[in-house]
Image: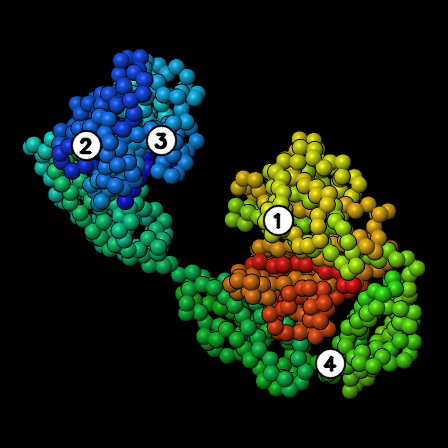
Amino acid sequence: MRRLLPLLALAGITFLPSVSRAFTTVGGSPVWPDGNIVMHLQLGTGPVLSDGRTWNTAAADMLAEWNRSLVRSRFTWIADSTAPIGDGNGVNNVVFRGDIFGRAFGESTLAVATVWRVGTRRTEADVIFNTRYTWESYRGPLKSPGGGSAEFSRVALHEFGHVIGLGHPDEAGQFVSAVMNSRSGDVDGLTADDREGAAFLYASNEGAVAPRITLALVDQSPVEGDAVDFAIGVSGTAPFTYQWRRNGLVQGVSTATWTLNNVATVSSGVWSVTVTNSRGSATSTMNLSVTARPVAPVITRPPAAIEARPGQTVTFTVAATGSTPRLYEWRRNGAALGPATLSDTLTLTDVQAGDAGSYSVEVSNSGGRAASSAASLTVTARSAPVFSASPRSQSVAPGSTVVFQAAAAGDPAPAFQWRRDGVPLPGATSALLILRGIGAAEAGVYTCIAANAVGSVTSAAATLTLSASADAGRLINLSILTAVDPQDPEFTVGTVIGGDRTTGNKPLLFRAVGPGLVQFGIPAAETLADPRLELIAAAPLASNDDWNSAAGDVFGRVGAFALANGSRDAALFQPALARGAYTVRVGAATPAAGSVLAEMFDATPSASAGPATPRLINVSVRKQVAAGDLLTAGFVLGGVTARTVLVRAMGPSLTQFGLAPGDVMADPRLELFSAGTRIAGNDNWGGDPQLAAVGTGVGAFAPRGPTTTDAILLLTLAPGNYTAQATGGSGAGQVLVEVYEVP
């Protein structure tokens, strides 16, 4: 077992403070076996110091200084030793090096002592002085504190104190004059506190009595949330150290008595304390068994409303937490349907109109009870189809793909038939009509007929016209306003540059805005103070932390809002990206929480955009979304004519890329808005083979299967601004929102 003990480093030492002394010892007070501690001084001959010593003789003097306080073990040394230098080789080396056996020195670290031990006995200690500094040897006040030079003797004295087992008293809240304090000061020799610490670890055993337990620990069985008192009585020769453990793991307690407040079930186990003095140790053990406090039930998912036809079987389900066993009492219109049972479901067979009503459940256990909200059961007779959404008129460029979509409900579910100018279209029997390679023959008036056994209805008419403009709609912007925190520190934005019959490169602007959001009314304390972004292809291409006015001249050209000069927002302009796939990683420069706006802009001037200009054929964002939260992605379609796009919110299908089912959003719901108005939505994509074929055609990965609960929309949209929102209701996890242009 090894421990690294640096001077001026603020971590890596376990302290056991005592109310009766200031000095501290390394956790467990590991010491050397009685006898000599042989140090191999290998600091080199070097120049003779101003006081007439060499580095090795100066080090020997510091070892001799500690020997005045040591009895059972004492330093001996070999000056100008040629013993092998290594970590864990059983040789105690004292050397100058530029690294710690292959590891870097910490910031402002002058020297370190690396210690190997077995149990409570030390087996090796190496002292390494950092060659980054210019070393001197003098007594008195420090000449250049915090500079590039260091005084050798007091640093050596400090590190040799670590070798024998002393820690930093100042980091344990003990503010005394000591060479063992964590930072170099004007103290240039051992103080009374340093000598007391050495004597504590290596005093003579003559006349001392080993510790004996006089008040042993006793088994305790508290209830969760109680306070537990630990107390041990001991006789023998003071001073004593106390090492407390739970299931063998050391606890941060070093007193004979202490209290564990608000005890939890995880605190259960075998507790022990080992009492140690200069003559030996004694251990007492107890069993702590914490009983869980009953937790009242909480309904996490109430029963959902059900619509059924006469004769169907329906099932209400409730989800609840709390201590088990839990009893469920189901009710209709407030009246109990029977005694409470252990079932969290209520099944009704052959439902009729008389079964309609309001259904609820009361959940109870030893900790209390909770009542659900009511869910309605509606029993309806068969009905003729009714359109809830009719196709919209479109104006597109020749050769485009056009999508007409309708939605109708009825009982039984209706069948669909599309018509153009009143003539049925062969095979067009889905609510989704996809027309590819539009020409003059496809222009006309489209209607959809929905029919079932009860009746039929015709949708409103939609007109398809051809635009004279060749400037087809194209993706020109993606923006995501979200939040990050140290537990969810970053997210990714992606794009694919390409398009059939396109050549050349594309300029793109990427931004990550945190402080700049205050101009939109977001309080500064709620923004990400220092966002950072990194552009990656097959390997990292570029990154930016603080934009410092870089690419500022591009903002106005692409329609991006201005950023204050000197803000810590991030911006990255790439004037010529080759066709291909790119990922932008967005996060905090240092761990922090706050809102951040990630943006991607097509910086191609509108006047120069043509059929051969590479396009953003895909934009996407992937992020962890908390339960009840949503992921919002805005995108802009430029150009003159409409463009068909495939919009997806993928959760379950991400498992084919190595994510566990519990790590993804189980059931994403996708909604699309324009100017604040909802224009489309989808919950479960339903395995539509047309959607699957379109996805394959644009290069999107296939859903994991036709029954996955991923959400997909296929729409023909006019140029403008759109907002896609993905939410998983009460579920949390990774979700991918992506937009593909459909040629």
For the residues bearing labels 4 and 3, Cβ distance under 8 angstroms: no
Distance of mark 4 from mark 3, alpha carbons? 80 Å
Distance of mark 4 from mark 1, alpha carbons? 48 Å
Distance of mark 3 from mark 1, alpha carbons? 38 Å
Residue of label 4? 413
Mark 4 or 1: in front is 1
Q: Judge the density around disc 2: few (<14), some (14-19), many (≥20) Cα neighbours within 10 Å.
A: some
Residue of label 2? 38
Question: Which mark is on residue 97?
Answer: 3
Give amino acid for label 1. Answer: Ile
Q: Judge the density around disc 4: few (<14), some (14-19), many (≥20) Cα neighbours within 10 Å.
A: some
- In this rendering, the answer to whether 725 lies above or below 17 is below
Q: Which one is nearer the viewer's eye here, 429 or 58?
A: 58
Distance of mark 3 from mark 2, alpha carbons? 20 Å
Q: Secondary structure at mark 4?
A: loop
Mark 4 or 3: in front is 3
Q: Earlier in the sequence, mark 3 or mark 1?
A: 3
Q: Which one is nearer the viewer's eye here, 431 or 8?
A: 8
Q: Earlier in the sequence, mark 3 or mark 2?
A: 2
